[in-house]
Amino acid sequence: MKKLLFVIFVSLLISSCAIFKYHEFGETPGKPGRYPRFSSKDYLIGQLDEYRAGYDVTFYDLNLNLDPDNKMLEGVAAIHFRALEKLKTIRIDLYKNLNINSLKLSEKEIPFLRNDRAVIASLPDPLVIGRNYILIVEYEGKPIIAKNPPWSGGMVWKKDKDGNPWVGVTCENDGGSIWFPCKDHISDEPDSVRLSMSVPAGLQVVSNGIMENHTSKSGKETFTWSTHYPVNIYNITFYAGKYEHFNDTMATEQGILNLDYYVLKENLVKAKKHFKQVKDVISFYSRSFGPYPWIKEGFKLVEGPYEGMEHQTAIAYGSGYSNLRRLGGDYLIVHETAHEWWGNAVSVSDFSDIWLQEGFATYSEMIFAEHKKGYDSSLLYARHWLAGWINNKLPVVGPPDVSYWDNKDNDVYNKGAMVLHTIRNVLNDSTLFFDILQTFYSEHAASSHVTTADFIEVVERKTVKDWDKFFEVYLYNREVPVLYWYSGSYDNDQEPGTNVIKGVPFVVAKWTNVPEGFSMPVRLDCQDGNASATIEVTTKPILFYLKDMTSCNQVICNKRLSYYDAVTDKSVLEEIKTLEPENK
């Protein structure tokens, strides 16, 4: 789910706070948010019950016919899977508005029942563990039409300026079963997918991976695309339209990466100029995170009939060929390309951990701004485009097993990004920080699903430090840490050989709004110079003398924008018994 419209209109919204509240940095609202009351349907969708957990999908082979005039989809889906348990009952998923005409296992019809999107089939014999099987599903119908794509799932049926059909599908929150039969749980990625789709003559189909074949017959065009990498169920996709195609290549450490672009005719000239930035984006992310994950199948931008979506190797593009000045590039290209690393290669198994995809992709925007515009500009981007729109009404990590993700809440994006930025500041070592990201990527890319615990494990392993309290505060609680602090000057340090009294700056500080035992460093800077100091602050008030900052006219904290609220409060001095230094 993308925040593109938010980016487009954010400048207007800043001046329209009666409608959309722009929050102070680190603000925690007094009233918490509430999760919806989850129903049996939510658990039906989100839980990996025994009928879905007992088998592993290896390959989807889809042979479909698309009828844009009647908004119909029909065809055959072959679901190849390996048995993990001795199941006598098996479940797949398909939205109930799509009719199943036939369901076969090993070429034999099997009976089934339908419960909402769940299709529960009875098998003649128990599955044999380790054996491979094929479910054949013949189906047809009119898929749900997306009301607000890509935020709401379904088909998008549009026409280009010349009246040609222009079709796509989006289903991140709603699942792939909105348009084809599948095991619709993000924990199970097929090893490969083949999509063969027929459309009216003159149209073209673009999908994940590489086009293997194109045939024309009896007023129909049939395109066959295949991907041989694991892919999220919601990232299996297609686009149908009258496209212009152009391509390019770029050199990478792994070899030549093919870049393919499919755009509407009227946008061909501007696209050829605008998409030149793709090489810099991919090159920068490859240096920052690790090699581009799909080198054998290339990178595609496809002009889609909706704003955008990170479909693996075939990203939907719809942001109007415009760059964001503060970012130094096209927001959609920068954000969605980051998802090839964070979301497509490194994927979560439950939407409760979706910050590992969206927060990481959003933080990628911030470091791309640093790459293009400089560090100070990236801080401006963080303050005004990220931190100001954090709600802090619910924790970043959400409830598991209910397929819950409120795409109206920006916190998995923006707060997730600010958590990563805060980790970088705490470490005060960018080399170590990016080593953590690269290790997390290399150990989990395209081979397994990740959880928040997996990321914490890498952080703790690399830093040899316990981060439990930090992540408890920033991911599992909604409240933002509050730093109560006060700075002053202690005038009892005489310069040797003189009668001049030199003021020694001091700071008293403590954390509140955090559990007992929380500790996090705070960086202090001279407002009028380059001197700085880092102090380790806990939940107990501590007095710090800043003898290396005696020339400071004013001490400021959090210049680098770690995500917390800082409150200057002289009353914190009352909790300190004396201002006398231990060593005069």
Image (cartoon, rainbow, N blue to C red):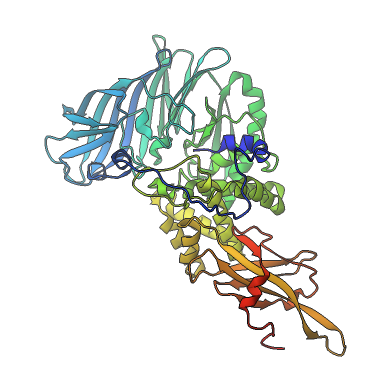
Q: Quadrant of residue 271?
A: top right
Looking at the image, residue 127 sits to the left or right of residue 524; the answer is: left
User: Is residue 185 among what the camera can see?
Assistant: yes
Q: Residue furthest bottom?
A: 497
Looking at the image, residue 290 sits to the left or right of residue 502; the answer is: left
Q: Compared to 437, does 296 lie above or below?
A: above
Q: Position of residue 378 (x, y in %)?
A: 67, 50
Q: Residue at x 21, y 34 (%)?
A: 120
Looking at the image, residue 138 sits to the left or right of residue 249; the answer is: left
Q: Compared to 578, does 355 lie above or below?
A: above
User: Is residue 284 among what the camera can see?
Assistant: no
Q: Position of residue 21 (x, y in %)?
A: 60, 43
Between 91 and 137, the one lying in front of the other is 91
Q: Position of residue 150 (x, y in %)?
A: 49, 32
Q: Residue furthest top?
A: 218
Q: Quadrant of residue 580?
A: bottom right
Q: Residue at x 68, y 39 (%)?
A: 15
Q: Compared to 328, does 179 lie above or below?
A: above
Q: Residue at x 58, y 43 (%)?
A: 282
Q: Quadrant of residue 345?
A: top left
Between 98 and 341, the one lying in front of the other is 98
Q: Compared to 190, does 482 lie above or below?
A: below
